[in-house]
Image (cartoon, grey):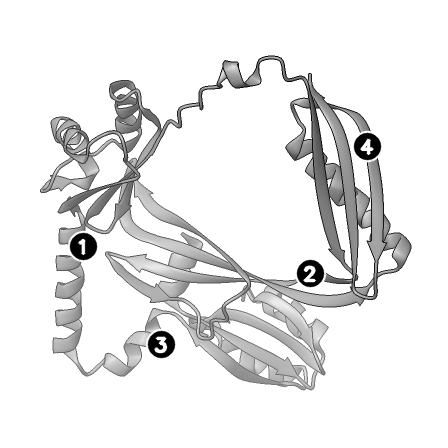
Amino acid sequence: MIFIFRFLLGWVEFTFTGGFKENFITKCYAKGIEIRSISNIENGIKASCRASVYKKLHHIAFEEGGRLRIIKKHGLPFIAYPLRHRAGLAAGALAFVMIVALLNSFVWKVEVVGNNTVSETSILDFLEQNNLKSGTLWSSVDRDKLYFEMMAEFEQLSWAHVNKDGAVARVEILENTPAPEADDDKLKGINVFHRELTVVINRKQSSIYLNSIEKYNRLHFFGIDIPLYINYSKGNISSTSTKYLTVKDVELPVGIETIEEKYFDYSNKEISDSQLKALAKKQLKVSEEQEFYDYEIVNKSEKFDIDENICTLNACYIIRRK
């Protein structure tokens, strides 16, 4: 909600330089002017405030011997200002938003993905009987209830969910995987096995560490996405979360989507022979746990082969079933 109000009212990012920054901040709060996101820069500070109170800061800045400069403008007032003499365009945009919002409030298509043994026809028939079909209002669809009813109806399912993608209801399901049947005749009388594992470790090891995290916000307003940022930089790992406005337990098509971008840096280094051996033995231990989880190791021999670039560890085993 805070992001929505800030977007509707507008805010600016500015710098204060060349004066007494501590006194400037103190006087702003003393006069009831809230400034946010304060950070130090060379010879001053960087901060943000509502667009409506920015002009009041000039007098305070002058008193403290500094100057202000706007570096970024955000919000609806700055987006709408160039369109102030185009009433027809604004009315058309409003009508378009209302039409899109009306269309997105209905289910116009139902898709089923992930099914193999359960036929799509049987799933669609079941959903239609439970009020999920073309022309249904999204507000009348209880997706949590549908999950439990689908799990009770189709025993082949291990998971099911109805995702809303605009006017499309995408039904994603996951079916149970039957366990393979063991051939007792082939296993009868076999108790001891010979196995080999090989691990290869490169002398040049890459390291990765988190450099920074940036969050970008986007306003979902009746089916239209409005970015609340100017410059967007794609990170190495992205994640999104959306919080919609709820009034009396009714979710409105207005909300804020937060995009979190994580940026990583990479570095390479060469490790010694002893470190190579330790890393190879550690990796071999992981491989043993994966390959021999149902077996007991009776005997084991290891052989290292190290050259300029890699370390190869060959291990031979005698194992038996637990």
At horizontal 24% and vertical 56% (from top left) the residue drawn is: 222
> Could you say which disc has been placed on residue 200 in the image?
none
Tag 4 residue: 300
Question: Of the residues tagged 2 and 1, which is closer to the observer?
Answer: 2
Q: Which sits earlier in the primary sequence, circle 2 or circle 4? A: 2
Disc 2, SS: strand
Q: CA distance from mark 2 to mark 3?
A: 40 Å
Query: Which of the two discs, 4 and 1, sits closer to the camera?
Result: 4
State the residue position of label 3: 78
Instruction: Name the N-terminal-most of marks 3 and 1.
Output: 3
Q: Quadrant of the C terminus?
A: top right
Separation (CA) of disc 2 from disc 1:
44 Å
Q: Is residue 55 visible?
A: no
Tell me the kind of residue under disc 1. Answer: Ala
Residue 62 percent location from the top left of the image: 61, 85
Q: Would residue 56 be visible to someone looking at this image?
A: yes
The answer to whether residue 314 is above or below residue 94 is above
Give whichever of 136, 17 is nearer the camera: 136
Front disc: 2 or 4: 4
Q: Residues within 10 Å of mark 3 (few under 14, many from 20)?
A: some
Frontmost of labels 2 and 3 is 2
What x and y, as percent, mark residue 25?
Answer: 65, 70
Q: Nearer the viewer, residue 241 or 236?
A: 236
* Residue, far left: 135
Separation of disc 4 and disc 1 at Cα? 68 Å
Residue 294 position, x and y percent, is 65, 23
Q: Which residue is at 61% across, 75% downward? A: 46
Work out how far the residue at label 2 is from the one at label 4, CA to CA, in angstroms: 34 Å
Mark 4 vs mark 3, CA separation in Å: 72 Å
Q: Which residue is mark 1?
A: 101
